[in-house]
């Protein structure tokens, strides 16, 4: 999961403490997002990822470039959000697109944008991941 934040762990002799760089998500929000991504990945067999941060112009091309850098980009779904630019891009790989048509990705994006407009970044992302995963359906299990 990429959320535009990095966690750096420091270990001392007797204590271990995590320092989080400034970002839009607290620990509870990160846990909710991680759970949503894990459930979506497991249910669909696709790889869902989130990017939160500024997107270079042209923003769609930048989001596509980020999606192509993911492991197995053909099966990857990237939700790229730039709160500062008020932009949202959903990018699906070739295999993922067969299961999540552009129309359904746009509907999920509209739902996410409505939540973002109400100030709920985490809730919008969790809802969007759920909608995309529901549309993709269950992973096909091959019997060897």
Image: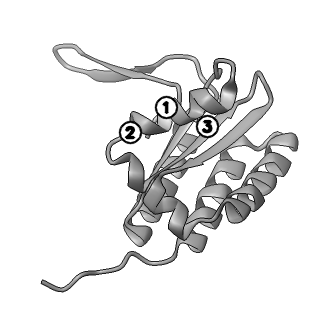
User: Which of the numbered marks, if any, corresponds to residue 80?
Assistant: 3
Q: Nearer the viewer, residue 114 or 136?
A: 136
- Percent coordinates x, y for residue 142 in the rendering: 24, 81
Mark 2 or mark 3: name the one nearer the start of the chain: 2
**Secondary structure type for disc 2:** loop
Colour scheme of the rendered structure: one colour
Q: Residues within 10 Å of mark 2 (few under 14, many from 20)?
A: some
Please give the name of the residue rendered at 61% of the width and 37% of the height, measured from the top-left corner.
Answer: 80
> Does residue 126 sit above or below 113 in this rendering?
below
What residue would you read off at disc 1? 66
State whether residue 73 appears in this view: yes
Q: Residue at x 50, y 24 (%)?
A: 5
**Do labels 1 and 2 touch, CB within 8 Å?**
yes
Q: CA distance from mark 2 to mark 3?
A: 13 Å
Please identify the residue farthest to the bottom as the structure is shown: 143
Label 3 close to label 1 by CB (< 8 Å): yes
99 lies left or right of 81: left
Tag 2 residue: 70
Give 114 or 47, whichever is nearer the viewer.
47
């Amino acid at each position: 999961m990429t959320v535009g934040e990095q966690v750096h762990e420091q270990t001392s002799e007797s204590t271990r403490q995590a320092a989080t760089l400034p970002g839009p998500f607290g620990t509870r929000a990160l846990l909710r997002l991680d759970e949503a991504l894990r459930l979506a990945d497991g249910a669909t067999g696709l790889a869902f990822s989130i990017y939160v941060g500024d997107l270079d112009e042209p923003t769609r091309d930048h989001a596509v470039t980020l999606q192509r850098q993911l492991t197995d980009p053909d099966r990857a779904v990237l939700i790229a959000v730039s709160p500062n630019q008020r932009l949202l891009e959903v990018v699906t790989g070739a295999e993922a697109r067969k299961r999540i048509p552009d129309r359904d990705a746009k509907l999920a994006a509209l739902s996410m944008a409505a939540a973002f407009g109400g100030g709920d970044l985490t809730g919008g992302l969790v809802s969007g991941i759920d909608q995309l995963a529901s549309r993709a359906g269950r992973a096909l299990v091959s019997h060897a």
